[in-house]
Image: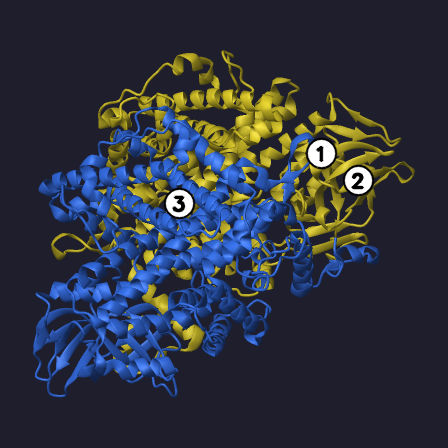
Chain colours: A yellow, B blue
Amino acid sequence: MSQLLQNFAQGPLDYYRKQASFDWKKMKVFIDTQEGVKFQNNLYEKLQIHPEFQKNPPLETLNEKRSTATRQALAYANIVKSLTTSEITTTKKEDIILRTILQLSPSAAFKYPGTKRLFTSALQSQGTNRHHKFLQEAESGKIYGCFCMTEIGHGSDTKNLRTTATYDKDKDEFVVNTPDFQAAKCWAAGLAELATHAIVYAQLYINGDHWGLHGFVVPIRNPGTLLPYEGVILGDMGEKVGVNGADNGFLIFDKYRFPRENLLNRFADVTPKGNYVTSAADQKDVRGAILGALSIARVTVTGKSEFYGTKALTIAVRYVAVRRQFGPKNQEVSILEYQSMQYRLLPYLAAAYVVRFFSTYLDEVTQEFVKDSKKQNDPSLARRGMEIHVISAGAKPVSGWTFRDAIQECREACGGHGYLKASGIGDIRNDQDSVNTYEGENHVLIQQVSNWLLKIQNGDKVSTYLKSTDFISNASKILKTKFNASSLDEVCKVENIIDTYQWLVCYLLRETKQKFDVLKQREGSFWAKSNTQIFYCKNLSIAFVQHLFLQRMLTVIDTAPDVNIRNVLLKLFSLYGLYNIEKFLPSLFGGGYVQNYKATNLVHEAVLKLCKDLKNDAVALVDAIAPPDFVLDSILGESDGQVYQRLQTALVRSSYEENGLKCSGEAVSNIIDPRNKL
Amino acid sequence: MSQLLQNFAQGPLDYYRKQASFDWKKMKVFIDTQEGVKFQNNLYEKLQIHPEFQKNPPLETLNEKRSTATRQALAYANIVKSLTTSEITTTKKEDIILRTILQLSPSAAFKYPGTKRLFTSALQSQGTNRHHKFLQEAESGKIYGCFCMTEIGHGSDTKNLRTTATYDKDKDEFVVNTPDFQAAKCWAAGLAELATHAIVYAQLYINGDHWGLHGFVVPIRNPGTLLPYEGVILGDMGEKVGVNGADNGFLIFDKYRFPRENLLNRFADVTPKGNYVTSAADQKDVRGAILGALSIARVTVTGKSEFYGTKALTIAVRYVAVRRQFGPKNQEVSILEYQSMQYRLLPYLAAAYVVRFFSTYLDEVTQEFVKDSKKQNDPSLARRGMEIHVISAGAKPVSGWTFRDAIQECREACGGHGYLKASGIGDIRNDQDSVNTYEGENHVLIQQVSNWLLKIQNGDKVSTYLKSTDFISNASKILKTKFNASSLDEVCKVENIIDTYQWLVCYLLRETKQKFDVLKQREGSFWAKSNTQIFYCKNLSIAFVQHLFLQRMLTVIDTAPDVNIRNVLLKLFSLYGLYNIEKFLPSLFGGGYVQNYKATNLVHEAVLKLCKDLKNDAVALVDAIAPPDFVLDSILGESDGQVYQRLQTALVRSSYEENGLKCSGEAVSNIIDPRNKL
């Protein structure tokens, strides 16, 4: 292990590093595996000396940001290709590839592996052999594809997308058309500058008959000149809140033609004579199958928010460990010693671990599913695919919102200095922010969970491939249980936390169903669903997802390499669970699960105790998941803890660069000379 | 009224405007007063045609942003000066002046009236006649002052600031010195480029004796050349997360000298012979008086967050009213009809009204206090000043956090298009973000409230000038009451909401005090305070502040000009109250105030019902507080509701500007020609 991972430089973080109850290197190897850490080391080594990844003066124009991101993506793809990966698993490898570039240059990550993977996975999941050439050309870099679903006027509401693809039998071609600007495809990354091909979703028409939404692979730019073809209008979404190196664009078709074979025909096809053929019972099933296949791409998004969150937490935890202010008897203490700071940061650090383990798992089961669905023709595959779809549709918003809040808390925990661009947290926030509305707007997406759960009938024996709902079979028994912890130890126990969540899911499911049924009579199904979202469907989905997160964490804890690691992971488990249970207390009281009013106090004290118990481990917990300093790129968060030295260097440098330092008085130049350490 | 305010252009927002239960113009005049609206109209008229405030290509370099903000601040100061204000009150006038420039150009607002006011109010509150010349020169624009408290290593912890000012009797001068970079003054707006003078807080030394923190007015730049004087080193904080037109800087003194008279000697003075003279009992009182005087400047910050929040809410409410998606029977509906959207936005709209009324009130009582404290020498003034200090120290974080969350919800409510820079919400978030850590870091600041409340002894008859704590005199009676609403109507009632808050404050005060007393025995006072922050001190302070907000809202409602306005304000009152009470349910159950488990359901249903009742008023509520379109500057939020037309224009324009539209196919150019309406 000592060869695999180097010690951090000595400095102000030593105090907490020495206090840690576990070995951070062992934890890191446990999380990333030995082969994973070796792969990371090789990757970091190449990145750190690569000219495209050196720190440069800030990029100012959109064009600069775009072209830098493109060059970085290309460089990164080449570095990744050059690495021999020996025994590392595909999931682990892909996790490290995406994590590293997303933390190093989020805009480059959109270009590689982001958009490229979206394009190829749509081809793989919806195309057939006849689209193999596109896949090959995309893999070899001959063509570059993007993914066009959303239109200006419609996003999540895919049924109402308005781009049309009409079959022209005489020429054996489709004619794709954009009726007006509201139907322009938009937001697709890659569309504004790079893409030669687009996966386009359009309403299929044959002989005047409407067959619903279908996917097509459409050539849009000449791969040699990158100029759009006649009939294709491409534009730029312009400046965004973040990830401005990504070239999000819009696309308008003017009766543009392409060959019939470009229809992605895995679920339905059009014959040369214009017959629509499908094995699905009706068009709704075709649309369902297409959207289901798409969800596979969404799986990685749960992890993305955690990648951003972990970066922010690394900065904030290290900064607050170093920063010393008010203490007893005029002695200053690290502000990590404050209860308030522990409560603000540690539950999110727990979430970083919990979500990290879960998203790795979700990647794994998805890859297995994709593999199985290629070789088998088993009707249970559809149900399995649906379960993965639902879980990813729930995990993405829960993770997105959690780390959105975590990043903001990190920004404020760093005080005024967190507002410096050089802290890095502002950019992390602006980049992560996109996750909450792309690849499915969070509030729309999370409804998939409650919609799915509401189909379970009272007393159903529920058993699914991933066992996510199996406990609901016991709902009637679970609903009779009560919260009966009466000490801090009891309340922190694994069983108590799992029991509470299972009661909560069963309770919210029953209540939501009852409310929905009543409203449905009165208002019809659409409004009944809309009017059960808040406090019911949404809470149900969140509790269901958090319960899955916790269950996965338990499985991971069972494989912990030593008792110290096991113990700290158990504390993270309990903190994540109780921090969130605290927010559900109104429902726990409201549903009669908690009957003793003292439970509020017990849960509060337990959360605070866990925070306190974990504060000496916080720095080591961060060390085990932190990106290396050159990836982190924050003057407040580097691993040696030399915050003030870096602040000084950064401020003096920016003063010289921006305006020339307004300096006079040579005698003191040593104070501000960046070469002088404090 | 019809002459004062014009109707909005017809368009997609008409539907909701016609549904409104009240007259938005009457509401606006009620809030801003007739004279206020006239003043606004004159101000808008001049701003709208002023060359400095025309929309320009985006500013990219820091220098461009800085100089634009400076020119705008200067132009704004001149416009303000040119307006005759007739009968408008000072508070109303200052509110409009700050609100308008903050919503139009936040960076310019830092330069005027921001920093200028900080400088002059410190002179007024801590200086004496001998500093009158600085005040005059600042008012006439001959000098430009800034405000330097925070150091790199210490912010809120003012006792540990390390800049020193040593009296040199021989030359009748102070020598101010910065021992090292961690003691450099930093963050002060104006310091990097503009300020000729700084209010500097430093540890006073006379003859080796340390007399604690004192304020000085120090000349730092030659007003003619803007070059720093010998012995003054000035630098730039560089790029920030937002408000990059503000020139925040840092300042290092190298044994720099200035006259003894520049000590701000309102609370303590140094004689030419080096004697320290003060009427205060000890140095702690001097520091308290200085910090108290400073809090006056903080009063406006509560409003600032609301100014930002109102801007974001205007954009989001109008956008979601226009945006149509999923509906029943394949018919699309405005997404404002969704329960989830109502719940996400309307409680924040309620907060915008509640906080607006409160911060106006806080401005008024502060101005009165400043006036009274000049003419009287009443010992009760200190208590009155303390109460204003505490309330402003609590209102600033509560408002800051509320609108921080509101802005984020607005960003997500606008879906993907909210992520466009042209939506305006990203910038609003990045600018508002600074408020949470400047002029007192929120978490440190809010402790002032609980510290103050904890001094109240059980059974004390408490009566303060602003009556903020008077109800606590009845604590023992209040603590015997129970939540007994049993219908939606009852739960929404004013009395129920006020009663719940009063119980909550009394309960949290008692519990906090008990916990603190126990911990103090064990851990000493410092750690006891730190370890009662979460769930105790912080919740106590928040509940106390929200109760004050609600009390003020009631007073305002009593003066409503008609029953329709009264009714809608009452709904906003109830929604703000119950939305926040819902979050306190764990304590309400935990303390035994709520004993019937059905209360959870009742509160939930009440919040949702209020949201639904208010949704048809949402657009009109926004109309009454929205800035005009040219100030709003958002393609999603303009008052005519033509969202898609503006999206089209903006995207096509940015495509041409950035890269030249990748367009071919002339036949369709009409689709994307910005001159063609949809």
Q: Would you name the residue on which mark 1 appears?
A: A127
Left or right of A179? Residue A28 is: left
- Alpha carbons under labels 2 and 3: distance apart: 44 Å
Q: Nearer the viewer, mark 1 or mark 2?
A: 2
Q: Is residue A241 above or below residue A485?
A: below
- Name the residue rendered at 43%, 53% in the picture: A631
Three-letter residue code for mark 3: Ala
- N-terminal of the pair, mark 1 or mark 2, is 1
**Pointers 1 and 3 in contact (CB under 8 A)?**
no
Relative to the observer, which residue lies in front, A308 or B500? Answer: B500
- Spot occupied by residue B337 in the image (x, y as percentages of width and height): 58, 38
Q: Between residues A536 and A576, which one lies in front from this camera angle?
A: A536
Mark 3 falls within which chain?
Answer: A
Looking at the image, is A438 positioned above or below residue A537?
A: below
Q: Secondary structure at mark 3?
A: helix
Q: Secondary structure at mark 2?
A: strand
Residue hosting label 3: A406
* Residue A605 at least partly seen: yes
Seen as rendered, the residue at the extreme front is: B562
Q: Earlier in the sequence, mark 2 or mark 3?
A: 2
Circle 1: is it few (<14), some (14-19), or many (20+) Cα within 10 Å?
many
Q: Does A612 sit above or below residue A449?
A: below
* Residue at screen point 66% across, 65% down: B657
Amino acid residing under circle 2: Ala
